[in-house]
Amino acid sequence: MKKDENLYHKGLRRYFAQASQQPHFFPTHLSILIALVQCCNYQDITLPFNVSRKKLMRFSRIKSVSTYHKNIRELKESGFIKYKPSWHPKLGSEMKLNIGLDKNF
């Protein structure tokens, strides 16, 4: 495993460990985070990416639009994601995972 890949995996482990310890997070919060990681998997995880609500809801298995928006808002307020909404049906909203990939683990 390359040094950058090892940093990436450590950063993700720490990110999900912090998320799973949040007392107000439910499984839907974690499933959205996992869906976000899946959506940006082929890109640099430190960069913003565009994703549609429909795709995230499908990956995270969330059926309710209100639950989706509530969870996205709470993830944003907790600092786990940066979210810039877009009302363009094809472009999707801009998301960024706040994963610190610094070398101080």
Image (cartoon, rainbow, N blue to C red):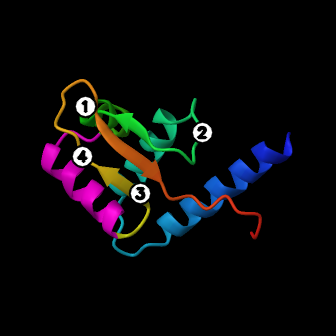
Residue 79: which quarter of the image? Answer: bottom left
Q: Earlier in the sequence, mark 3 or mark 1?
A: 1
What residue sits right under mark 3 in the picture? 81
- Residue 104 circle label: none
Disc 2 crowd rating (10 Å Cα; few below 14, some 14-19, many 20+) is: few
For image coordinates 49% across by 65% down, the residue present is: 20
Mark 2–mark 3 Cα distance, whole angstroms, equals 15 Å
Residue 97 sits above or below residue 35 on the image: below
Numbered badge on residue 85: 4
Q: Quadrant of residue 10?
A: bottom right
Q: Is residue 91 above or below residue 30?
A: above
Mark positioned earlier in the residue sequence (1 or 4): 1
- Mark 2 or mark 4: whose residue is earlier in sequence: 2
Q: What residue is disc 1 on? A: 54
Q: Residue at x 37, y 70 (%)?
A: 78
The reply to whether the magenta stretch includes residue 100 is no
How packed mark 1 is, by other alpha carbons closer than 10 Å (few <14, some 14-19, many 20 or more), is some
Q: CA distance from mark 3 to mark 4?
A: 12 Å
The residue that disc 2 covers is 44
In the rendered view, does 2 fall on the left or right side of 66? right
**Range of magenta residues:** 62-77
Which secondary structure dominates the residues rendered in magenta?
Answer: helix
Does residue 59 sit above or below 14 in this rendering?
A: above
Whether residue 47 sits left or right of residue 60 in the image: it is: right
